[in-house]
Each structure stands twice: as structure tokens, then as C-alpha cells.
Image (spheres, grey):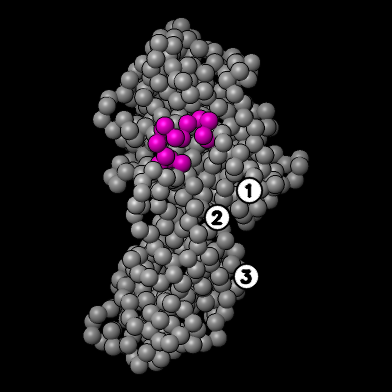
Amino acid sequence: MTAMTFIARDVADAATAASQCAILPLFQNTKLASAALKIDKATSGSITAALALGDFSGKRGESLILPGTDAAKRVLLIGCGDAKTFDREGARKFSQTVYQALLGKQASEAMLHLAGLGLKENAAKWMLAYLARYLIAASYRYTETISKPKAAIKLTRLVINTKGAIKPRLASNALSEGKAIGRGIAEAANLGNLPGNICTPSYLAGHARKLARSSGKLSVSIVDEKQMRALGMGALLSVSTGSEQPAKLIVMNYKGGKAAAKPQVLVGKGITFDSGGISLKPGAKMDEMKFDMGGAASVFGTMRAITELALPLNVVGIVAAAENMPDGSATKPGDVVTSMSGKTIEVLNTDAEGRLVLCDALTYAARFKPAAVIDIATLTGACVVALGSHATGLFANEDALADQLLAAGTDSHDRAWRMPLWDDYQAQIKSNFADLANIGGAGGGSITAACFLSCFASDYRWAHLDIAGSGWNSAPKGATGRPVALLTRYLLDRAGL
């Protein structure tokens, strides 16, 4: 996990403040802010000289490193564009430019003079939370099975000079929030990137127990296959039957709120490898099916974030973990299985397995008397066709819940787009031989999958996030850690933070 410390404090004199790198935001065609003026004077006018020579203009995304002083060894100028149009997109670009400018440099400590951005208090808090989150998440490198991982930024300590910008306490809170979310994103990405021969359902169960040891408010229980059979989880078990890896239903119970308060429940699809089963997938890019547990990974990442933040809220994380493989005992197309709810399901395609593990997990979630249930899954290729990789597909059985998730996605820039969940589509999942079919035929594949899940979530407020497009990238290949930021922001909002 990336180690980086963030400190917020007022600095009396920017020119004499010791750091390996002084970071100065500069806008186009504006006068230098106080900190920049003082450092410019201390460096015999190096900043004004760079501007006069045209080596730096302040254009958004521009950066320039100059020699510093005895106190500030380097001076990093970051272009922020037009001051009148500096918004959250500008703040995101600023964070990315800082990271790229320091990548490959030897500075392990830096000081950002925040007042140069001229932000109001709420904008400054958002900026600092995003900056910490981005630096942590961008610094993540996969290391488990390679001897020489790609180099990351060497920065391990960032001091924010809050003087003239924001109170240090408020800045510290924002930085802590961003750091926790960044670590959650990195956690989810790392679990997603692990190969299927390491990251098995049993591995995820062990990882949950390890996470529980980091917080006295988090407890973990594991439902094994024997217990699943006793509970009647025939849908979930139908997926693991062709694999030598036993399925696990992993339950993480975080009790940060009042004892009687209803919990928010997150349910993650944890297919640690998806061959398609008897309905075997094509060989090309089948390796990417290790990412089919991205929903589960996001639940782990979110649980890490909220435990680090000690969120005053009750949250239950449920991971339905299984491996989908084709052996002689595997479920066949046309087989009928009975779910925990008692509904029977005709399995027309064994590659539509995510909804089979999720439907039993959704039924199990009802026992917690939830305030709301959100499931997260790399569920359908149809969602990729509809939305590409930028937006997560959002389905919900209540407008208020959908609006809360959409708002959290917009605020965190981990965006979702609401899709229809109309009764018109339910006819597509009818079966002549069972209560439901697990696929809905041609057209509206992501919608009919959500409609299937909705049949098991009618007793509570429920939303479904399809992250098939947003959960990983094919080029460069790797998990994204989404939608940890969206989910954590949603939970922070529910906690009133």
C-alpha cells in the first residue's frame, strides 16, 4: 500500500520555509501571488524571468522546475490556466500535473503554497481531498508477481501551506478523506490485478479477515458451501460447481454508528475467474476475466476507506465469491436451479453467472434490515456498448437513492449514468420451465440483467452499479479501483460529512 503523509499548517514566510520542492500554482496573465512573489525575490527573479522568456506561461497542464534556494531546493511552477475559469476540472488537472512533474524526480518531500489558487473554503477542501486521493491512487504500482515494478513518484510527504487559504484543521480533514479514498482505490485495483491462481474465493476470505484486524469496529464472517446449501443458495452454488475452488460468501460488518441504526449494505460480485463455464468464452482476452471480481474489489476498497476514516455509520459489505469453470459437474445450459429466495432460475447461459451469485447475496442482505442495498458488478458487456469506460451504469428501484448515487458520482468525479428499469423489460426474462431465465435475449442486455436482480431486491431500497466498462482498462491493462470513490462519497454523505 502506498505510503504518503499529508500535513497542513500555516507557514509564516514561504521564502524561508524548508522543503525539497516548493509547489507554486500560477495562472495566466495574472500577478504573482504572495508566496510566489517571495520565492521569486529569494531566487533573484527566476520566476519572472521564466515568464518573460516564454519558458512558462501559466497555461493549464504546464509545469516547470527551477533551481530553488537554501530553504526550498526546487521550485515547481504549475500552470492553472485562466483564473476566472478554474473549476473542479482545473483542480483535477492541477493534481495530475503535480504528479507528472514530480515523477522521475528525487524529491521525497514538497510544500504546496495553496493560497496561490485563490479558492474559497469549500473549493479548497474539495481540491485537497482530490489531490491526496489522486497522488495516492496514481502512486499505486502492482508488485506481487513482478520483480521490477514500474517506478512511482518518490514523494512521501506533502506539506500544505494553508496560510491565506483555509484553516489547517479543515485542510487536514480534507487530506485525510482523500488519502483514505486513495488507499481504498489502490486496494481495489490491487485485488483486481491479482491473477486468478492467487486471488481465489478463499484468498478473498483471508483478505477480509486481515482487514478486520485493522479495526475494532469491523467483524467478518464467512459462509462456506455447506452453510450455503443449508440456506438454499442454489443459484450461487450452481456457479462454483464446476470449479475445484469452493465458493465463499464473505460478510464484513462495520459498526461505526448507533447500534439500532440500519446499515448501508454493499454487495460485490466476486467471480475470481470467469471462463464462461460450459458456455465457454472466446480465448481472446479471456485473461481479463480475472477482473470479473471488480465489484467485490470495490467493496473491499470502500470498507478499507471507511474504517480508516472511522465513519460514524453502520455498513455491511457482502462479497459473493466463486470461480466459474467448465468441468464434468458444471452447470449446463438449460439446467434449472433454486435460489435462496425460492425462485427457480433456468440457466440459459452459464456465462451469465454474475447475476446468479448476486441474487442469493441480495436475498441474504435482507436479514440486516438495510437502509439501502447497493450491488456492484462487472455484469454485462452490453453496458460497455452503451456507456463505454467513462460512466458506470446505474439502475435503482427508487429515485431518491438513484439521485444520491448520481450526486456522489458527480462530486467525486467517479460518475454514473442512470439506466431504465422498466417493467416492459421483465417479459424478456420469462421462462417456460422456471420462474425466471438468467438471460433476456437480444437487446437491452444490461437492463434485463438489472431486471433479473430487481426480482430479488423488492423488499428494500436497492441500486445496481454495472462497472463492466469502468472497472478495468484493456490498454494499458489494469483494474481502475472504481467505483470506490463514488461509494465512499455516498457513505460520507449518509454520515453527514
Q: CA distance from mark 1 to mark 3?
A: 25 Å
Of residues 320 and 139, the one drawn nearer to the viewer in this rendering: 139
Closer to viewer: mark 1 or mark 3: 1
Disc 1 marks which residue? Answer: 214
Tag 1: Cα neighbours inside 10 Å, few (<14), some, or many (≥20)?
A: few
Say which residue appears at 49% left-offset and 14% top-offset.
Answer: 345
**Apparent side of residue 186 relative to residue 389 in the rendered image (left or right):** right
Decide whether residue 150 is among the magenta residues.
Answer: no
Q: CA distance from mark 2 to mark 3?
A: 17 Å
Identify residue type, mark 3.
Arg
Q: Position of residue 315 (x, y in %)?
A: 64, 41
First in sequence: mark 1 vs mark 3: 3
Residue 460 seen anywhere in this rendered image of the structure: no
Say which residue appears at 44% left-offset and 35% top-offset.
Answer: 198
Magenta region, residue range? 191-204
Disc 3 marks which residue? Answer: 169
Q: Quadrant of the C terminus?
A: bottom right
Q: Which mark is residue 180?
A: 2
Q: Position of residue 26 (x, y in %)?
A: 37, 77
Describe the element under mark 3 as helix, strand or loop: helix
